[in-house]
Amino acid sequence: MLSRVGSSFYRTAAWRLALRSTLVFAAGSAAVFLAMYFIVARTVRERSDSWLTGESETLRQVALNTPRDALYDRIVEEVAELASQEVSWDGGGRHVEGNTVFFAQIGDPSRPPVWVGPHDSAKFLDALRAMNIPQGAPVSLRVSGWREPFRVVALDMRPGDGRLYLGLLDSGAVHLLRQLLLRFFLGWVFMVAFGFLLTLLGLRRMLQRVDAITGAASSIRSDDLSSRVPVGSQHDEVARLARTFNNMLDRISSSVNQLRTLTDAVAHDLKSPITSVRGSLEVALSLEDREQSSELVASAIEHLDRLSDVITTSLDLAEADGGALRLRRETVDLSDLVHRVAELYAPAFADRSQQLTVTAPAPVLVTADVSLCTRLLSNLMENELRYAGAHAHISFAVFATGSSACITVEDDGSGFAPDLLPRVFQRFVKGRESEGHGLGLAFVSAVAGAHGGRAVARNRLPRGAQIVVELPVASADQEDRQIPDNLLTSH
Amino acid sequence: MRLLVVEDDTTIREFLTRALTESGFRVDACGQGAEAERLALEGIHDALVVDLTLPDIDGLELIQRLRSQGVSSPVLILSARRSVDERVLGLERGGDDYMTKPFAVAELQARLRALLRRSTPGQAETTRLRVADLEIDLIRREARRAGVELQLTQQEFALLEYLCRNVGRVVTRAMVLDHVWKMRIDTSTNIVDVHIHRLRNKVDRESQHPLIRTIRGVGYLLRD
């Protein structure tokens, strides 16, 4: 169990991101520290090298000016001793532990070399002889038994007198550099570890909130869309993610609810006509009387026509809601259109003793789909025919108000039922005594919406209903598309 | 008159063949685009009825190919798709008329007749129509029944003219709305019936022989 938790932790984004950023940080800071160290080390070496160069020149002068007699070795040794004393004491007179200086003059093999320095001279001389040291330039020399290399400068003497060597092991500097390296290293390790821990914890905290969203999301099922993810008090990206997620859930749940209403309605509105069509045809089949059976077949066809209308309108509405309704825009005079549609409906209103008034004195131009606008107006007319009631006064008016064209429909009928009013433009919403499918006003609203306008319904005081449809008026920048007349008017 | 019906749905193909044969056409029918192309290239058909969804090639492409190979007979497109865009596309590609499913057979027949009329020129425009004792003067916009002038509104006159021009043939509600009011709206309501009822009151009330009949489930018929 523990190992499973462990291995799953190493697969988290928090671990991966923290590790990656820490590695980059570690490499970068190590490079900076090393560069600093090498700069310091070079400066220290240059200091000892410049001492070596100066001092070796002095020794050479002394050696050259001292006659090669029995005292030669003594004098040179003394000078070398003095020189070595210089570096063994710091500026304040304190003895510097561990600084080691050696001096050697190696000439022809018959004379023993002059040597001032540590007692194990043989090792030094071997090392000096083994290495080909260039004239005048300090180099590093490793001597067996010594952990640190010496800096050595070599100077040629007169022919026959061989070479003069001066070596220095600046232990103080070496110690300083070692301390520096150690501190750099410890500091680096601490920085990297601390940084890693901080990044890891920060990322984990953030990603745990993401995990909480994931958990909440995976617990949401299609049959229960009520739960929401925790948003938290912060206003950062993760909180925004959570809020966006919750908004999305709100929209999905409202869509699902609409879909449920829709499927219920479809089940009812499609199945009942199918049932009656089937029934009519079945009875017609068994009837002997041709006239009676024709009557039934005709009624079946009428049901099918209604069914076909429901399907067509539902598809149009679905397209309009999905923003996929294609508009063939052209300049339409709404006043003219209302008059024409009213002419078509006038006898039907008269038959029901309803009075229709149309007030559209001036042309109102909109850039719109004339076919959809015609259906919008005919739907409004049919709505009044059906629901305004006998002897109602119905008035249609068209006028322009600034940037929009208004179509208002008013009647003095019984108005919308209060529970229906907020939903009259939804699909399949209809009054209890309605014979329609509840698509007419939904279509009106969808067409208005597709044109960038809207439809509003309210009840009038003391009685009656009012529907206002607003469409944006024709704008000059919208291109008029001329469509052959037969395309728009023919089936 | 010989027709070629191209429709992949067997049921629809069969009823189209039957309905069009009954109304006096000779009908060849097939369900494949390739076969349709071969038959159409024989050049013996006066008009083509083409469904857009064929199993082998797209109906629009078939029409385009036929046009490019010199087939000039009028083409009536059938489609289940209902967008205005597709209608425009169909007519651009060489179709002459476009109907969406479902449709009334009466309307299909009327449209085919209109297409065939269009493709056989040389018919003089009439100025008077006469059915039994009904006379219509198209220039003076007057109608008389048994010599008595009928008081008709403009709409009623246009409706009567349309029925007379289609004497002996059934016209659907959609056709009436389309030709008389130039509108394409839902036909589920009885709005056209109201107009027909009023017209009938004026034309047939005084007569022993009613001319305007309602064919339930389909539309209206004017005949003597």
Image (cartoon, rainbow, N blue to C red):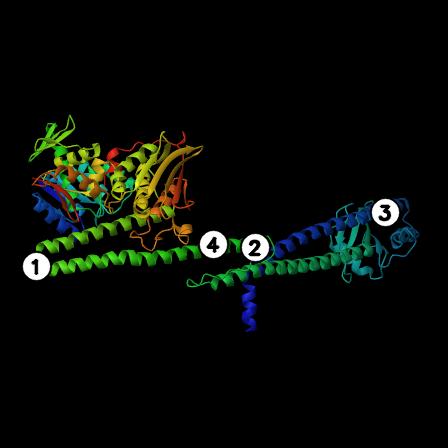
What residue is pinned by disc 1? A288
Q: Position of residue A198 (x, y in %)?
A: 65, 59
Please tell me whether mark 2 or mark 3 is closer to you in this view: 2
Residue A1, above or below A220: below
Say few, some or many: other residues with alpha carbon within 10 Å of mark 3 (under 14 / 14 to 19 / 20 or more). Answer: some
Residue A232, above or below B58: below
What residue is pinned by disc 2? A239
What residue is pinned by disc 3? A55
- Seen at 37% across and 40% down, the residue is A409
Q: Nearer the viewer, residue A36 or A478?
A: A478
Query: What's under tag 2, amino acid-wise?
Result: Ala
The chain carrying label 3 is A
Q: Earlier in the sequence, mark 2 or mark 3?
A: 3
Q: CA distance from mark 1 to mark 3?
A: 140 Å
Q: Is residue A127 left or right of residue B139?
A: right
Q: Nearer the viewer, residue B9 or A365?
A: A365
Say few, some or many: other residues with alpha carbon within 10 Å of mark 4 (under 14 / 14 to 19 / 20 or more). Answer: few
Q: Secondary structure at mark 1?
A: loop
Q: Earlier in the sequence, mark 3 or mark 4?
A: 3
Q: Position of residue A129 (x, y in %)?
A: 76, 54
The total number of labels drawn is 4
Q: Earlier in the sequence, mark 1 or mark 3?
A: 3
